[in-house]
Amino acid sequence: MIAEKSATKPIVACEAEVIEADVAIVGAGLAGSLARAVLARAGYRVILIDKRLIPPDEFRVEKIAGRQIDILRRLGFIDDVEAIAAPYDRVLNIRSGKLVDIGVGRSYGISYANLVNMARGLTPDASSFLLDQVTNVSCSEQRQQLTLASGRRVVSRLVILATGMTNVLGHSLGIRRRMLAARHSVSFGFTIARPDNAPFDFDALTCYGEEATDGVDYLSLFPMSGGMRANLFMFRDPTDPIMRELRRDTRRTLLRLMPGLQPYLGDFEVVGQVQNWVMDLTVTEGHLRPGVVLIGDAFQTNCPAAGTGVGRLLVDVERLCTDYVPRWLETAGMGVDKIAQFYSDRDKLAADQHSLQLASFRQALTLNTDMRWNLRRKLHFLRRMITHRVDRIHPGWVMRVRSALR
Ligand SMILES: Cc1cc2nc3c(=O)[nH]c(=O)nc-3n(C[C@H](O)[C@H](O)[C@H](O)COP(=O)(O)OP(=O)(O)OC[C@H]3O[C@@H](n4cnc5c(N)ncnc54)[C@H](O)[C@@H]3O)c2cc1C
């Protein structure tokens, strides 16, 4: 939907004490930057504020695949991702040195900093970005106000909080984070290379953990600018000495945890920095307030092993910015009746719930050693191996049986 002409006047000069906009977005990570791109393209006066000019080289999502690609395509951004990401189409899935199956389908490897830079660049109008820290938010049914560290103020009809995992601003509005699982998972990100940069024998590879006691869910290897990237996802106490070993002697510790990897990797070394992250699973409470809406990690955190963070934030951006915001701006006021429509959106609820369910499933599939989960783990991999073998002998047969059973 295209905004009314009256709503498309340029934003009042950024040097001004008070900046006016239809929508003010706090946080220029992936969620906030994409939200600005969608709303600015529709003609709304949008201002995006972030305290950092350059997205830091922090370890976050580094793979785009599946449903994420579908939403990026619908939003019209997939060509922009494709222009800067490393594509791959086949993933060899292994466990204990044996092939489980081969995943086929387009995916992309890209550093988070590059992804965010791309998303920020989707809106060429530099005046819609403010380099500043938002220190206070005050919201009401009519007019929202942001106070910035520089002393400037932003006045808008709607505020979108896309501030990631920090909740400093939400706190002042009475928005709280409820801890679902402290230190739920630990993730490591690093790059590997072969001597003389010889290529690996696969496009991408996933190696699942071998023993429940190791707490390894999987290691994912995929191409990214700069080499073969590795994401290791574990459910294990972050204070366990193995964490230090993984940081200090990554190669040896990896092969000790997953000896079945060796024949697939051959001679290799870890190059550059080893980054790691301990994730708490939290959900937001008290978020139903007039004039303000939370998206992405600001609303709910995600288990990196489940790989649902980007899918969730894309659903948030698509539903909020292509449907609700255009409708809300058509009429006066920004009361909780409007805001509640977004939080009860069917697709959003499903994506948020799926993310939490998958986080518990991955943890239980990795760790749980009771009889039920031992059996479930065996059947999970057995089913995949049988399906793969049948599919190789009779291509398309499994797909036809599945469709017939639906
Ligand atoms: C290790 C790791 C691995 C992951 N792997 C995957 C994966 O494989 N697949 C997947 O889908 N997801 C993954 N995720 C999740 C995914 O990275 C996040 O869901 C996503 O990056 C969230 O983006 P965001 O825009 O909501 O938040 P962020 O990218 O954190 O952006 C928040 C922005 O807000 C700004 N900000 C905050 N407060 C203020 C303020 N007061 N004033 C101004 N600016 C402010 C910050 O500077 C920042 O730029 C992973 C996460 C981690 C930690």
Image (spheres, grey):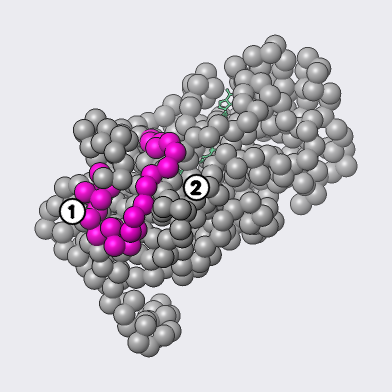
Q: Which mark is residue 211?
A: 1
Q: Nearer the viewer, residue 104 or 325?
A: 104
**Secondary structure under the numbered disc 2 in the rendered image:** loop
| Residue 238 rendering spot, x and y as whole percentages | 27, 33
Residue shown at the point (59%, 44%) measured from the top left:
115
Query: From mark 2 to mark 1, how far is it between C-alphas?
Result: 26 Å
Q: Secondary structure at mark 1?
A: loop
The segment highlighted magenta reads 253-277
Instruction: Tell me the quarter of the picture where residue 118 sits.
Output: top right
Local crowd at mark 1 within 10 Å, few (<14), some, or many (≥20)?
Answer: some
The answer to whether one can see residue 327 in this image is: no
Query: Mark 1 vs ligand 1: CB under 8 Å?
Result: no
The x, y position of residue 295, in whole percent, is 55, 39
Decide: marks 2, 1 in contact (CB < 8 A)?
no
Res. 335 image quadrant: top right
Percent coordinates x, y for residue 374 in the rendering: 16, 59
Percent position of residue 351, x then y? 47, 51
Identify which residue, 48 or 206, lies in the foreground: 206
For the C terminus, which image quadrant?
A: bottom left
At a point 25% along the width and 36% down the height, the residue shown is 245
Label 1 sits on what residue type?
Glu
Left or right, residue 111 beside residue 364 = right
Whether residue 118 appears in this view of the structure is: yes
Q: Does the segment drawn in magenta span residue 251?
A: no
Residue with the most extreme front position: 196
Q: Residue at x 21, y 33 (%)?
A: 241
Asked whether 313 or 270 is in front, the reply is 270
Which residue type does callout 2 highlight?
Answer: Glu
Residue holding disc 2: 62
Q: Is residue 117 left or right of residue 108?
A: right
